[in-house]
Amino acid sequence: MSTDTVVTQRETVAAISTAAGEGAIALVRISGSDAVNVGDRVFRGRSKPSEFQSHVQHFGHIVDADRMIDEVVISVHRAPHSYTAEDLIEISCHGGVLVTAKVLEACLSAGARPARAGEFTERAFLNGRMDLTQAEAVIDVIRAGTDLALRSATEQLQGRLGQAITAIRDDFVQLLAHVEAAIDFPEEDIAPDAGERLRSRLDAARQSIADLLATAEHGHILREGVRVVIYGPTNAGKSSLLNRLLGYERAIVSAIAGTTRDTIEEVINMRGVALRLLDTAGIRNSDHELERAGIARTERSLESADLVLHVVDRSEPAAVDVVQRPFEAPEILLLNKSDLLEYPDWANSTGLRISCVTDDGLAGLEEAILAAIGGAHLSPENSVAISARHRDCLCRALQSADRAAETFANNYSAEYAAIDLQAALAAVTEVIGSAGDDAILDSLFAQFCIGK
Ligand SMILES: Nc1nc2c(ncn2[C@@H]2O[C@H](COP(=O)(O)OP(=O)(O)OP(=O)(O)O)[C@@H](O)[C@H]2O)c(=O)[nH]1
Ligand SMILES: [Mg+2]
């Protein structure tokens, strides 16, 4: 926690912080300057929450207008040493849907208002307890589906990205101070090497931004997973491949051409990388309305693919492809049915030979997939991975910084450099956020669930 934490008075809010549904325990949280009073009103036990030592759990009952609702364990986390940096109360009650709702209701009738989605984390941010990248990491930790994604989210939660951004921001602050001094006091003699030092400092900042931008692809893979579309002619064995990769019979497989109509999506974890596998309708000329609708879906899926697994039946003649590659994603050609005799058409093909019946070649396919999506960069050591929002801010920062560099190089007026440096500074600051960015904060915290 930063030492300059400033906690402003905000309304007291309450919410159920655990997922809806039945469980052994559910957690209700109350945060705000009146939280302890609300606690005093709803809790009956040996002592009152206002008398509790911080962070110590107490047993007792929650009451609503003196009617007992549940047996609970409760603790007070006094400001600023709590998740929100405000006075915070945590009530662990029984995890039933109705009983949890009643405990929350008691807190609301005792003076709290319902918290909005993400409001606890938003307060943690507004109270200086974390920067915006850390607040975003809270969602990433909750949503992480693989070890790698979790590791990266945890590092971000600890502030690794925030620190990198702060260092870049400090560079721009210093650069601006120098440039503005030169504007304000043109008569002062500036040391002859000052210009050179400014240039190299600006170059270092630009390089740091470029390095972070290079992690955007990695961040996309960790957060969204890789969209892998399985496509090819009918009967090639696309659905069989999906089933093999999943390890169970998810899609219907049959010798009838045109079995799969709708696209089927399933997620697998391939060595720490989430792959969103899409099995699609086989491509052929068809008069059947349903099949044509399925093929149209295949074509749409291909447009948004990160990687395409193009499956063909190598025991059959090579058909002329009906689709004119409507995608830009890299493709891996798979010659399926390697357990059958190869049709001569394929003799010179460099495609990977696999069999969905004998599993021949599937280990090699895993390697090929990881290589195609840059698996080498997905090592736990490269754990800083920016999101689409960060990339947008950093791209703007880099553009402005490039313009400032041009101004320096051409010895244009310092005023121009100042404008661009200010724009770069603003764009970099947007990554870690400042309390005034209401539109950014609203859209970001709306993605959270209530109670976080
Ligand atoms: N011998 C052999 N048969 C296979 C192999 N893979 C799939 N098949 C068979 O090929 C036929 C078609 O398999 P599917 O997985 O349904 O093919 P598909 O590409 O999904 O076909 P559509 O959904 O109609 O486009 C089935 O009879 C499978 O059992 C393989 O590696 N070897
Ligand atoms: Mg199929």
Image (cartoon, helix red, strand yellow):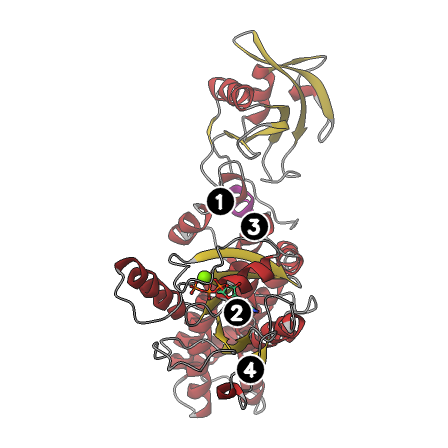
Quarter of the image for residue 35 reads top right
Residue 341 lies left or right of residue 271; in this view the side is left
Residues drawn in magenta: 122-128
Q: Which residue is mark 2?
A: 216
User: Could you say where residue 334 lies in the image, as x and y percent from the top left?
Assistant: 54, 76
Residue 287 screen position, x and y as percent: 25, 65
Marks 2 and 4, Cα distance to the nearest angstrom? 42 Å
Real-space Cα separation, disc 4 to disc 3, in angstroms: 44 Å
- Return the mark for residue 448: 1
Q: CA distance from mark 2 to mark 3?
A: 18 Å
- Type of amino acid under label 3: Arg
User: CA gap, disc 3 to disc 1?
Assistant: 11 Å
Type of the residue with mark 1: Phe
Regarding mark 4 in the picture, which secondary structure is present there?
Answer: loop
289 w.r.t. 179: above or below = above
> Amino acid under label 2?
Ala
| Label 2–label 4 contact, CB within 8 A | no
Q: How many residues crowd around disc 1 within 10 Å: few (fewer than 14), some, or many (20 or more)?
A: many
Mark 4 — residue?
342
Q: SS class of the residue under badge 3?
A: helix
Front residue of this view, candidates 108 and 415: 108
x and y percentages locating residue 96 in the rendered image: 57, 23
Q: Secondary structure at mark 2?
A: helix
Marks 4, 1: nearer the viewer = 4
Name the main secondary structure of what is drawn in magenta.
helix
Q: Residue at x 60, y 71 (%)?
A: 355
Amino acid type, callout 4: Glu
Q: Which mark is residue 143?
A: 3
Assign ligand 2 to one image quadrant: bottom left
